[in-house]
Amino acid sequence: MTAPNARRPRQLRIEVLRHNPADAASVPRLQGYELTEAPGMTLFIALNEIRETQDPSLQFDFVCRAGICGSCGMLINGRPGLACRTLIQDMDPHIRLAPLPVFELIGDLSVDTGKWMRAVGERLEAWLHGAAGADVDRMEAPMDPDLADAIYELDRCIECGCCVAACGSAQMREDFVGAVGLNRIARFRLDPRDGRDDGDFYELIGDDQGVFGCMTLLGCQDVCPKDLPLQTQIAFLRRHMARRGFGGG
Amino acid sequence: MKILYTDVLVVGGGLAGLRMAIAARRRGHEAVILSLVPPKRSHSAAAQGGMQASLANVIQGQGDNEDVHFEDTVRGSDWGADQAVVRMFVHTAPKAVRELAAWGVPWSRVRRGDREVVINGERVTVTERDGAHGLVAQRQFGGTKKWRTCYVSDGTGHAMLYTVSDQAIAADIPVHERMEAIALIHDAGRCHGAVVRNLVTGELTAYVAKATAIATGGAGRLYRVTTNAVICEGMGQAIALDTGVAALGNMEAVQFHPTGIFPAGILVTEGCRGDGGLLLDGDGHRFMPDYEPEKRELASRDVVSRRMEQHIAAGRGAHSRFGEHLWLDITLLGRAHIEHNLREVQEICRNFLGIDPVREPIPVRPAQHYTMGGIRTDHTGECPTLKGLFAAGEVACWDMHGFNRLGGNSVAETVVAGMIVGEAIADFCDRTANDAVVSTGLARDFLGREQARLDDLLKGGGRENANTLKAAMQNVMTDKVGIFRHGEALAAAVEELQQLVERSRHLGVAYKAPGANPELVVAYRLQLMLRLALCTAAGALARTESRGAHYRDDYPRRDDGEWLKRTLARWPDPTAALPTLDYEALDIGAMELPPGWRGYGARDHMEHPAAEGRRARIEQVKRDLAGADRFAVQEALMPFRHLLPERYRGPNERLDEGTA
């Protein structure tokens, strides 16, 4: 544990960009809340305290509160991140929160990442192809242990939407699949159990909505809470898709 | 009035719900899944360490099979489990791993040759077989004789959930997100669907279905300190209880996980101890071997959690500004192992504690973790008293866990029960007699009843605050219905919870919006959660013995003579102050493994009068079948294969065991 804090607890001012699209009278505005910092306080704890003691109308999303599920992506002082695992002790006492851009706003800090992710998943056919017909009584097919680890590395994405919110292309064109979508393709492309080849993947991402829409600003990798190697994966995919586009193998 | 029709209504988008929906869809039935959150955010994702299935690929798992998994699970349950269901489960678990391997889960794989592992605090070298190279690997978990837990680093649940969710998308199964079932529609012992509230708009819709399947997970949020996600509030159990017809089994059986990080209660996986991590006290002493020489840190969770609390109560804990705790030390595993196989643990420690577990021990204390009890079902997953209502996973009392679940058996149950119950649901929907015949009047009645309940909260003028009452309930449960229980404290808990129920009839909501309204959600859920809490507390008060995770210090012995039975809680009269408690005896004469010592923990249980006779009978059968293979012996003792869907009856192939 960290040493007991000898200082008086700090007074926090948390400003939230609020708007309720379901309410015709609602106008986007910043609303400030004052509260006293507690030891080990995260934004999860602070926002719940605000809602329970000051403002029952405040909307936000938490599920696991352990940095695993990806529900609580928001702009924290302008930068996309997971609120549940953001420790306030490391921050200035004046904190500004806003919903992730790009995604449909449900209200206040709550956005509809689920709908967006499902739509991209459907568009990119982001599931293992050729999964049917396994004989579950027989031993599983072997896989190289390093390859299994490499697939898991890309499978660690939690679809929190931070990469999309930090993406220049996604701000400009709403049909861009984002690093999250490209990473999923990279994951299935790496997996020998998937029956698709580069020709199939080219059909899915070989355009400006896909891998050629990336402007290489790489905000995605800067903010990814899971430290996924998005930069490498996008570059790798682009090289293979370009080769494919020029008629190579 | 809005009514939506489907064949199968699945409530809950975690692993169990998704897998049931896929099973029904593949059999040609329409399925709709309701989920509070995007399904990939479900609490299944939090299962870190792995899934038990007796594949016997690693050398420390050699010799493992269904029989060993069965015995471990029954002993773990402290003989509370339904042994036929355990058999169905252990037989299907290898198939589930193999199915998921084919669907894309990147299971961690065996690497041939020597590797160093930590066993009982010592570094030892084990040599993996050439033939096992590339097969799914297993790690050690608590309460098991063999290394049986298949894993994907320490993100097993996440990888499984993403794979199954992706397959549900591939099967074009619609998921209605941010939708909550707040009541079941039923009449004359038949369930017809649910009243569903849109959490964004507040609109109510009647979903009418041939089969309704609940898979909403556990009820950890009845407690103040829990590893569970904030959505694990027990609403699936609660709406079943609210029918007055369905029963909840063994709600007093609540598991506390030994290693919640202190004080936040966030889980760090049992894989930490399975891989060789140690529990240390305030003096840095490894105390578990003093209490549990046989299994040490790897006794079952109920035993380890009790020993930890006992050690803290003896003044041996570590002190911090938040209170007393113990240490989980994984530094001995080394950086490479932690960064490879325990990376989520490392991330959690860094983000929530500001420490690196490679160099420092982790402050831990037991926290509520798992709800063994739930909607009582038969072996097919159907509620015996409410036709057309099914349940699977943590929400159900199928009953493979009895009074204590083994680590790695829950995420396994989600997919295995999803496979088995999913087939039963498809069979149910195949039968024309089960076509939905529901009058719109019935749907209107239920919609009207629920709308009135919500209106009363919004406009009824009540003055009680839901957050205050919820915190009071969580305190009662944590302080009086926790790891150590006592008659007086339990009686006080029942009384306090009843007072809270009374106060909850006068809840008022300050924020009046009918749509997205977090305060309203807390209020209407709390009224139902309080009933679950009462089922737990009243069941615990009535059960005057100690079994598995239910420990009474005024009745410290397991009493098979009196209590080899399952608690069934019902709430037939909505105005009643307490649930009715009935009991369902476990038939010792049908058990493959009659009650005895678990192999760890207390040895002083009170014997059932029929146990000796059943043991003698089993010995006789084994003598009669001397020379027969293990399948024939098992079949003679407790036949179960006929209970499985046909497609899952085949034998499981292993490296050392062909299927021919």
Image (tube, coloured by chain):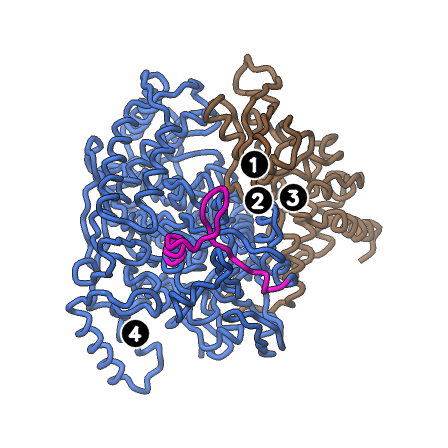
The three-letter code of the residue at mark 3 reads Pro
Q: Secondary structure at mark 1?
A: loop
Q: Separation of disc 3 and disc 4 at Cα?
A: 51 Å
Q: Chain of mark 2?
A: B
Q: Separation of disc 4 and disc 2 at Cα?
A: 50 Å
Query: For residue B310: magenta?
Result: yes
Above or below, comparing residue A245 to residue B657 in the picture: above
User: Bounds of the magenta span?
Assistant: B307-334
Q: Separation of disc 3 and disc 1 at Cα?
A: 16 Å
Q: Earlier in the sequence, mark 4 or mark 2?
A: 2
Pick the front one: B126 or B149: B126
Determine which residue is flagged by label 4: B635
Q: Chain of mark 3?
A: A
Q: Give the brown chain's letter.
A: A
Residue found at the far right of this picture = A246
Q: Separation of disc 2 and disc 3 at Cα?
A: 14 Å
Q: Earlier in the sequence, mark 3 or mark 1?
A: 1
Report whether mark 2 lies on the same chain as mark 1.
no
Pick the front one: B82 or B4: B82
Determine which residue is flagged by label 3: A225
Q: Give the blue chain's letter.
A: B
Q: Which mark is residue A42?
A: 1
The three-letter code of the residue at mark 1 reads Thr
Report whether mark 2 lies on the same chain as mark 3.
no
Answer whether labels 2 and 1 touch (C-beta < 8 Å): yes
Above or below, comparing residue B220 to residue B341 in the picture: above
